[in-house]
């Protein structure tokens, strides 16, 4: 337990936390959990590889992917490791899933949702992945109080994870910004090296606005094997017919049996499984509806709907992990698997700089390079990169 850190973070931040909470639209009678108390809750658990004071900046995911694939000889559309295995990457995003919701998958009992059987989730994707490698405390929002500070929001965060830098460099600090082409996502980078890559989300804004320059680049080069998919968009909607048909962008995937709290996440699971079956090398999918549940009800593992969305996505991730394991045996493949969230939340919103919003998590089957830990991180320590 890092008492000095906890006390310092709490002392520095209590006034700001209240201000941000007011902006996020919390009900007046709600008392936000203080930053200090939140860190204490997280650090009381031993599930984490690291301590909160050594949290990992979320952009480390990009470097983690590069470290794995750049050891390979990449030729003829595949990445082959020094040991002769075909290397592939699976990234699953859990939009808006707070770090303390991850705690409950390991330690909690689900007293809210009897349909899930109560108790600890038997088939947990996040717990299974953490057992293969580890789960880390991480952070979004840039280095608070510096020029790299960015909103604790979806577009800024996923883009930092995909490009390896904060929004001050890639251009997205809020959900309305557009990524520049100076910093490419690893999804585009490895497509340019000849690998087959794919990214799906069900939020129009991300592909239509935030990544539009990159999507345009992909459209202009049909030789690139990159798929950007909006999971809930009918084919041809919004895009010109010819573009959609030529490049199979935005393929519609029908949701199978959607949970009321995660209507498109089963479609996401099926799309990820389909891309893996098609032989893609880098497959990225983002489950969105934990975030939706947070906005509709509350970002809190004590909220039944929020928790149900977490459990649903976690069980889908478990199903996908079983396929990874099977493929490694069947096809001499070696997968890097990364699960992560983009931000936390407080009340029914996020975007501010409280630790409930800033604190994120990363689970992966290969341990992260510790040189990228933010040394002495207390949620607000400057770490330039
Ligand atoms: Zn959100």
Image (cartoon, rainbow, N blue to C red):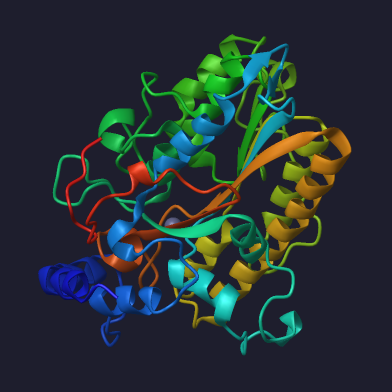
- For residue 247, side relative to residue 180 (left or right): right
Rendered-image quarter of ligand 1: bottom left
- For residue 4, side relative to residue 370 (left or right): left
What residue lies at 78% left-to-right and 49% top-to-bottom? 325
Q: Position of residue 164 (x, y in %)?
A: 39, 34
Q: Position of residue 368 (x, y in %)?
A: 47, 46
What residue lies at 36% left-to-right and 19% top-to-bottom? 182
Image height check: is 220 above or below 59? above
What residue lies at 79% left-to-right and 41% top-to-bottom? 328
Residue 94 lies in quadrant: bottom right
Image height check: is 265 above or below 166? below
Q: Is residue 34 visible?
A: no
Question: Is 158 or 31 nearer to us in this picture?
Answer: 158
Outermost residue toward the right? 330
Instruction: Look at the image and tell me in which quarter the C terminus lies.
Output: top left
Image height check: is 172 above or below 382? above
């Amino acid at each position: 337990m890092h008492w000095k850190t906890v006390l310092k973070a709490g002392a520095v931040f209590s006034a700001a936390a209240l201000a941000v909470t007011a902006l996020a639209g919390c009900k007046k009678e709600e008392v936000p959990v203080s930053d200090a108390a939140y860190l204490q809750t997280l650090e009381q658990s031993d599930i984490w590889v690291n301590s909160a004071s050594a949290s990992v900046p979320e952009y480390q995911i990009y470097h983690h992917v590069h470290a794995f694939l750049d050891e390979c000889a990449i030729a003829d559309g595949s990445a082959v490791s020094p040991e002769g295995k075909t290397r592939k990457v699976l990234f699953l995003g859990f939009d808006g899933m707070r770090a303390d919701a991850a705690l409950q998958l390991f330690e909690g009992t689900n007293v809210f949702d009897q349909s899930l059987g109560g108790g600890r989730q038997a088939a947990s994707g996040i717990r299974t992945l953490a057992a293969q490698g580890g789960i880390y405390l991480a952070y979004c929002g840039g280095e608070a109080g510096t020029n790299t500070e960015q909103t604790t929001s979806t577009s800024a965060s996923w883009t930092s994870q995909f490009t390896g830098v904060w929004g001050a460099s890639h251009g997205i600090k809020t959900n309305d910004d557009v990524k520049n082409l100076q910093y490419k996502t690893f999804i585009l980078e490895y497509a340019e090296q000849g690998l087959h890559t794919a990214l799906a989300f069900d939020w129009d804004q991300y592909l239509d606005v935030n990544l539009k320059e990159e999507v345009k680049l992909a459209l202009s080069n049909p030789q690139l094997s990159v798929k950007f998919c909006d999971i809930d968009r009918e084919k041809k909607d919004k895009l010109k017919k010819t573009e959609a048909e030529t490049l199979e962008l935005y393929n519609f995937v029908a949701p199978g049996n959607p949970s009321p709290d995660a209507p498109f996440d089963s479609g996401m699971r099926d799309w990820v499984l389909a891309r893996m079956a098609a032989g893609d090398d880098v497959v990225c999918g983002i489950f969105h509806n934990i975030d939706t549940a947070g906005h509709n009800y509350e970002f809190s593992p004590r909220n039944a709907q929020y928790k149900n969305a977490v459990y649903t996505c976690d069980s889908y991730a478990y199903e996908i992990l079983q396929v990874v394991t099977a493929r490694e045996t069947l096809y001499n493949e070696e997968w890097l698997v990364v699960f992560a969230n983009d931000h936390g939340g407080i009340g029914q919103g996020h975007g501010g700089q409280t630790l409930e919003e800033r604190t994120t998590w990363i689970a992966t089957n290969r341990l992260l390079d510790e040189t990228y830990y933010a040394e002495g991180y207390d949620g607000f320590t400057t770490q330039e990169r």
